């Protein structure tokens, strides 16, 4: 007979597996262990947009994370192998102010559908979950449990955090990946990923082909010392796609787009202080997505990739075991591609900047309250936002 038990865990959900105060429901089903975890958040945002007339707004909106509902099963250990399977879906808690009941936030986002096999060789992971490139940047960003930048002052859906304002979104991608066992603090993870072909009517899958996988990798090192710890990560992404040469959406190209990028980061904790720094550089990287139409231009026979780079630096201090304050600044810059005849898309030069001041307080193991002030500029507008809200975890 299935027996239910409630246990305390020090893990919750991310937009893909982030440590956070939580309480999980778990039970046994024969030799299998089953658990259900989740989180819901909502923020009251007072937003002032300085670059358009009548651009101020008070809006109830979730932060960088949507709601998360995660179901996980762990197999018994058999012949040295342990299996784990996980499904996470992410609905919105907010409504658009301009959509009515058709609120542009009602669809359920199936962010994670994957399984892992663990053994002495490391971990083999198959399915869809958070990417490797820029993963360290987003998981160590304090606005992960806050709001950060906003992409629209009245819409439903999540905010941006530092996506496009210090790093490119790691995204949830389908992949086959292998992670090494821990090697005295070192580990490496490499994967073959389903390629991306951009988005938008001007450059979609009808125009390009991707006959090789996208490659991503991340190297991590962590160590501790008396009263503190150090963590380092370095990741990369490579992808190629070629124009089909057939007319679609009003153009045809035989040009190639080569996406490449690197991300390097450092996290140091000592006493109550924390410091995070992250930097990236690449070509044909989208300002928000890893591969997008704003990162290249094409004519009939060739494509030009835009250079992109960015960074953020973050300092935090735990004024008590339950309360953290933080200050961070970051920016992302994408150069303009050459103005080509009959271009697929015109990638204008742009620079996004974001400064965040935040207070993050754990009321208890299942309730977090947050206050942030965010000041941003760039492609989504010049917006200042005072956001107050919180999370429940289970």
Image: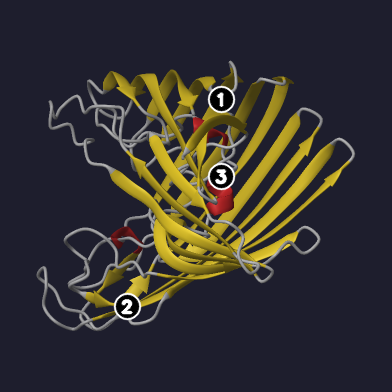
Which of the two discs, 3 and 1, sits closer to the camera? 3
On the image, numbered disc 1 is attached to which residue?
357
172 or 266, which lies in front?
172
| Cα–Cα gap, marks 1 and 2 | 42 Å
Q: Is residue 185 above or below residue 51?
A: below
Q: Where is residue 306 in the image (x, y as percent from the top left)?
A: 40, 65
- In this image, 41 relative to 53: left or right? right
Element marked by disc 3: helix
Work out whether residue 335 can be spotted. no
- In this image, 267 relative to 343: left or right? right
Element marked by disc 1: strand
Q: Position of residue 104 (x, y in %)?
A: 19, 36
Quarter holding residue 270: top right
What is the total number of numbered labels drawn onto the structure image? 3
| Cα–Cα gap, marks 2 and 3 | 29 Å
Q: Is residue 282 above or below residue 275?
A: below
Q: Residue furthest right?
A: 226
Which numbered marker is on residue 210? 2
Counting residues from the N terminus, which is met first, the one under dot 3 or under dot 1?
Answer: 3
Which numbered marker is on residue 139? 3
Which residue corresponds to the image point at 76% horizontal and 38% vertical from the top-left? 269
Work out whether residue 138 can be spotted. yes
296 or 62, which lies in front?
62
Tag 3–tag 1 contact (CB < 8 Å):
no
């Amino acid at each position: 007979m299935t027996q239910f038990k409630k246990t305390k865990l020090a893990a919750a959900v991310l937009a893909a597996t982030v440590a956070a105060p939580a309480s999980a429901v778990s039970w046994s089903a024969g030799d299998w262990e089953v658990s259900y975890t989740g989180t819901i958040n909502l923020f009251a945002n007072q937003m002032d947009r300085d670059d358009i007339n009548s651009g101020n707004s008070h809006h109830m909106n979730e932060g960088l994370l949507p709601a998360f509902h995660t179901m996980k099963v762990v197999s018994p250990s058999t012949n040295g192998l342990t299996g784990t399977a996980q499904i996470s879906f992410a609905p919105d808690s907010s409504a658009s102010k301009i959509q009515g009941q058709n609120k542009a936030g009602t669809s359920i986002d199936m962010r994670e559908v994957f399984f892992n096999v663990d053994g002495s060789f490391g971990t083999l992971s198959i399915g869809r979950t958070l990417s490797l490139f820029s993963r360290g940047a987003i998981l160590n960003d304090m606005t992960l449990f806050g709001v950060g930048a906003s992409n629209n002052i009245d819409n439903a859906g999540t905010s941006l955090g530092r996506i496009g304002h210090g790093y490119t979104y790691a995204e949830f991608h389908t992949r086959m990946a292998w992670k090494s066992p821990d090697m005295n603090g070192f580990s490496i993870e490499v994967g073959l990923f389903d390629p991306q072909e951009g988005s938008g009517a001007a450059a979609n899958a009808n125009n390009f082909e991707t006959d090789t996988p996208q490659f991503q990798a991340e190297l991590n090192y962590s160590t501790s010392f008396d009263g503190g710890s150090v963590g380092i990560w370095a990741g990369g992404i490579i992808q190629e796609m070629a124009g089909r040469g057939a007319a679609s959406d009003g153009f045809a190209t035989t040009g190639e787009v080569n996406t490449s990028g690197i991300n390097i980061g450092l996290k140091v904790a000592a006493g109550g202080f924390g410091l995070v720094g992250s930097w990236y550089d690449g070509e044909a990287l989208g300002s928000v997505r890893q591969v997008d139409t704003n990162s290249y231009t094409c004519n009939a026979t060739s494509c030009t990739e835009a250079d992109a780079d960015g960074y953020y630096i973050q300092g935090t201090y735990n004024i008590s075991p339950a309360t953290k304050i933080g200050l961070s600044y970051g920016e992302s810059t994408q150069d303009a591609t050459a103005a080509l005849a009959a271009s697929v898309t015109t990638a204008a030069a742009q620079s996004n900047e974001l400064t965040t001041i935040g207070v993050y307080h754990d009321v208890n193991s299942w309730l977090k309250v947050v206050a942030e002030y965010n000041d941003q500029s760039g492609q989504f507008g010049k917006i200042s936002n005072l956001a107050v809200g919180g999370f429940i975890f289970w």
